[in-house]
């Protein structure tokens, strides 16, 4: 069940992050950005999840997706 929640939250975070950072991606890439961002955010912002629950998880996923997009733009394929 947590995997499904991770995909749903990651997809939402990936969609918001790619739109906020004006990045055009296809649906699988958007979901991947969100899911990987959720993992990054979950690792970095673990204490936030403990304090605020699901909202903290979404914020962490969103921040993680922003970081991933920034890294992709800096070091990814051109």
Image: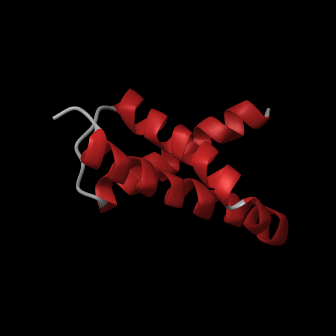
Give the x, y percent position of residue 60: 61, 59
Q: How is the image coloured?
A: secondary structure
Q: Does the rendering let one see residue 76?
A: yes
Work out whether residue 19 or residue 76 is closer to the camera in this orientation and state it.
76
Instruction: State the residue lying farthest toward the left.
Output: 78
Give the x, y percent position of residue 32: 47, 33
Instruction: Please report the residue visible at 62 percent of the width from the left and 43 percent of the height from the top.
Output: 39
User: From the viewer's perspective, is residue 12 above or below residue 54?
Assistant: above
Instruction: State the residue lying farthest toward the top.
Output: 28
User: From the viewer's perspective, is residue 47 above or below residue 68?
Assistant: below
User: From the viewer's perspective, is residue 36 above or below residue 15?
Assistant: above
Q: How many circles with numbers are drawn on the protein?
A: 0
Instruction: State the residue lying farthest toward the bottom.
Output: 51
Instruction: Please report the residue visible at 42 percent of the width from the left and 56 percent of the height from the top.
Output: 66
**68 to the left or right of 60:** left
The quarter of the picture where the C terminus appears is top left
Instruction: Please report the residue visible at 59 percent of the width from the left and 64 percent of the height from the top.
Output: 59
Give the x, y percent position of residue 55: 69, 65
Work out whether residue 46 or residue 49 is closer to the camera in this orientation and state it.
46
**52 to the left or right of 77:** right
**65 to the left or right of 53:** left
* Residue 26 found in image quarter: top left
Instruction: Please report the residue visible at 69 percent of the width from the left and 65 percent of the height from the top.
Output: 56
Q: Does the rendering let one see residue 9?
A: no
Instruction: State the residue lying farthest toward the right.
Output: 50
Give the x, y percent position of residue 52: 78, 71
The quarter of the picture where the N terminus appears is top right
């Amino acid at each position: 069940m947590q995997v499904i929640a991770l995909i749903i939250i990651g997809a939402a975070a990936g969609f918001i992050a790619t739109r906020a950072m004006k990045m055009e991606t296809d649906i699988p890439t958007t979901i991947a950005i969100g899911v990987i961002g959720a993992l990054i955010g979950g690792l970095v912002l673990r204490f936030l999840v403990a304090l605020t629950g699901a909202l903290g998880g979404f914020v962490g996923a969103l921040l993680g997706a922003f970081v991933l997009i920034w890294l992709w733009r800096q070091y990814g394929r051109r």
